[in-house]
Amino acid sequence: MTENNKKQNVVGIIPARGGSKGIPKKNIYLFAGKPLLAYTIEAALNSNTLSKVLVSTDSEEIAEVALRFGAEVVCRPDELAGDDTLVLPVLLHAVKQMDVVPDKVVTLQPTSPLRLSRHIDEAVQLLSSEWDAVVSISEVQLSPFKMYRLEGDKLLPFVADSNREGVPRQQLPKVYRDSGAIYVTWHDVLTKKNTMRGDNIRSYYIDPKYAIDIDSIIDLKLAEVLLKEERGSDSQKK
């Protein structure tokens, strides 16, 4: 994990399996005129830091879309395409198929279509030798200090001893979520520690409007509105 003057080999891996229960064929669902997967491929290919962009999939349809939009394809085995398959073994499988060992591995979920090329570049550049990984985060709008849990019928605060009744959201501690949009990991951390995050994680903040993670039709509709607003803002700047 040494840093030097040579250009680093940074590979972007997009895990995109064929099965999806919430939204059938979600990764190639037509979103604002293009397959959902295409937005992540284009952001990756237009970045200045990625040396290679791979799509890992078990689906011929997804593979065809990935190739059409300019990505390379790694065909994963069926045992890495189940509902309960974790991302880590998918990444390890993809990395093993590469002829050249990368310095950094950037994981880009296709369900984050609004993440931009500059976000990828900024996150990649943040990963230095003192860190194991960089993880994109966004602020949580609904604070856990305002949430509850149930014991039978009894309502209890989700955060013990929070005692925040009536406190405005702005006065509560800021809380962040893993946005799922970008993970940048040293190759050695990924392969030797078997983790995408490691022990020493650096945060990379993404504005929530770019960090939506699509899991349902409602998420898709919201993302379409946000995309339309972003395109409108860009056209006004021109």
Image (tube, rainbow, N blue to C red):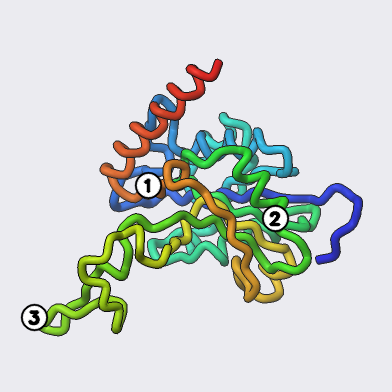
**Separation (CA) of disc 2 from disc 3:** 47 Å
Q: Quadrant of residue 190?
A: bottom right
Q: Quadrant of residue 96?
A: bottom right
Q: Quadrant of residue 230?
A: top left
Seen in the picture, residue 6 relative to 224 is either above or below; the reply is below
Q: Nearer the viewer, mark 1 or mark 2?
A: 2
Q: Is residue 187 left or right of residue 34?
A: right
In terms of depth relative to the viewer, which is nearer, 22 or 135?
Answer: 135
Element under label 2? helix
Element under label 1? loop
Residue marked by disc 2: 126
Q: Is residue 117 left or right of residue 10?
A: left
What type is the residue that disc 1 sits on? Ile
**Picture coordinates of residue 90, whole percent (x, y):** 56, 61
**Separation (CA) of disc 1 from disc 3:** 32 Å
What type is the residue that disc 2 sits on? Leu
Q: Residue at x 30, y 82 (%)?
A: 160
Seen in the picture, residue 178 relative to 58 is either above or below; the reply is below
* Residue 92 seen anywhere in this rendered image of the structure: no
Decide: few, some or many residues near mark 1? Use Cα within 10 Å; few <14, some 14-19, many ≥20: many
Circle on res. 153: 3
In terms of depth relative to the viewer, which is nearer, 57 or 107?
Answer: 107
Decide: few, some or many residues near mark 3? Use Cα within 10 Å; few <14, some 14-19, many ≥20: few
Q: CB under 8 Å between callouts 2 and 3? A: no
Q: Residue at x 62, y 32 (%)?
A: 70
**Separation (CA) of disc 1 from disc 2:** 26 Å
Element under label 3? loop
Residue marked by disc 1: 214
| N-term-proximal mark, 1 vs 3 | 3
**Picture coordinates of residue 122, whole percent (x, y):** 66, 47
| N-term-proximal mark, 2 vs 3 | 2
